[in-house]
């Protein structure tokens, strides 16, 4: 098990200062779990931003710090399963801040804000989850459906919602070194139709225990009535997300 002995004393002092600051003044939608005996693994709970498919979910993530931190970036992982283009099925996070754009002067607060902002504006062109990346570009409604389904099944529920939700403290940090990879919202096509919940659960390889058994007596008109409110909700959610992307680009 890793301990503080694996980190140089000057790094331990800096991390202790940063963690104390994060504990006393946490970023919006982020709660850091501090373990005074081991600073080499930083845990944090991230609230899904409002207006995204991850809304109402709380996702546990961790940052792994090597002995040569901060000269080398931490490695980021989601412990909570999530359907997102830049988060692999293993939980590994792909963001330039933790790779080629890393700078030793960047602090933990900056890294955590970038990860949360990634839930607002994914980068499908550098996807670790190819299915999610392709779906985001070609069929946003189905991408949002699956992302919400994962959120409902795997993410924890948070009791108190943030007031402003989706816009992070430092929205400009997300686009550092990634402007060329940004996909304009107008290029994301909308799907002509939605698949049923049974199709989504088949893709996930899970069974919805709350789903009622199919009734052959129920006609297609009944199914359309059930899908109606959901079909109306998804375009509205996409418009919210597009509006937030435009706000991010203006910053």
Image (spheres, rainbow, N blue to C red):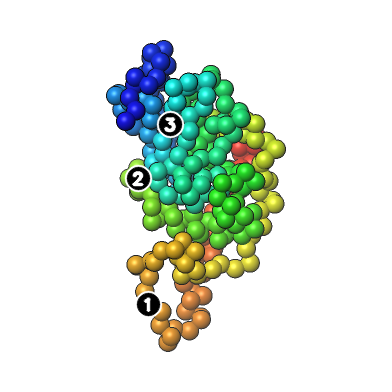
3 or 1: mark nearer the eye: 3
Q: For this view, does 182 lie left or right of residue 22?
A: right
Q: Nearer the viewer, residue 14 or 55?
A: 14
The circle drawn on residue 158 is 2
Q: Report the Cα–Cα distance between label 3 and label 1.
A: 45 Å
Element carrying mark 2: loop
Q: Position of residue 128 (x, y in %)?
A: 56, 46
Q: Are marks 3 and 1 in contact (CB under 8 Å)?
A: no
Q: Are marks 2 and 3 in contact (CB under 8 Å)?
A: no
Q: Nearer the viewer, residue 1 or 158?
A: 1
Element carrying mark 3: strand
Residue extending furthest toward the top: 10
Q: Quadrant of residue 22?
A: top left
The circle drawn on residue 213 is 1
Q: Residue at x 45, y 26 (%)?
A: 66
Q: Position of residue 214 (x, y in %)?
A: 41, 79
Q: Nearer the viewer, residue 71 or 198?
A: 71
The circle drawn on residue 85 is none
Q: Residue at x 44, y 22 (%)?
A: 67
Q: Position of residue 42 (x, y in %)?
A: 39, 30
Position of residue 188 relative to residue 21, above or below, is below
Residue denoted by label 3: 64
Q: Which image quarter is the N terminus in?
A: top left
Q: Which image quarter is the C terminus in?
A: top right
Element carrying mark 1: loop
1 or 2: mark nearer the eye: 1
Q: Position of residue 167 (x, y in %)?
A: 52, 37
Q: Residue at x 57, y 31 (%)?
A: 99
Task: Tell me if mark 3 has few (under 14), some (14-19) or many (20+) residues whose alpha carbon lies within 10 angstroms of its own.
Answer: some
In this view of the protein, can residue 154 be seen by the observer? yes
If you read the primary sequence from the N terminus, does the residue marked by circle 3 or circle 1 appear first? 3
In this view of the protein, can residue 51 be seen by the observer? no
């Amino acid at each position: 098990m890793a301990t503080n002995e694996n980190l140089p004393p000057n790094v331990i002092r800096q991390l202790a200062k940063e963690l104390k600051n994060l504990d006393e003044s946490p970023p919006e939608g982020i709660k850091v779990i501090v373990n005074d005996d081991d600073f080499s693994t930083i845990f944090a709970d991230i609230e899904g931003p409002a207006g995204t498919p991850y809304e109402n979910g709380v996702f546990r993530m961790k940052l792994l710090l090597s002995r040569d931190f901060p000269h080398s970036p931490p490695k980021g992982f989601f412990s909570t399963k999530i359907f997102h283009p830049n988060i692999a099925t293993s939980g590994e996070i792909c963001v330039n801040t933790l790779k080629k754009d890393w700078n030793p002067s960047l602090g933990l607060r900056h890294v955590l804000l970038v990860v949360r902002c990634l839930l607002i504006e994914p980068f499908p062109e550098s996807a670790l989850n190819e299915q999610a990346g392709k779906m985001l570009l070609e069929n946003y409604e189905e991408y949002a459906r699956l992302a919400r389904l994962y959120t409902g099944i795997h993410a924890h529920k948070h009791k108190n919602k943030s007031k402003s939700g989706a816009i992070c403290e430092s929205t400009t940090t997300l686009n550092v070194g990634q402007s060329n990879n940004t996909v304009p919202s107008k290029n994301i096509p909308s799907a002509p139709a939605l698949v049923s919940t049974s199709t989504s659960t088949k893709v996930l390889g899970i069974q919805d225990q709350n789903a009622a058994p199919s009734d052959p007596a129920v006609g297609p008109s009944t199914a359309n009535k059930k899908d109606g409110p959901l079909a109306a909700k998804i375009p509205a959610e996409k418009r919210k997300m597009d509006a937030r992307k435009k706000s991010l680009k203006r910053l």
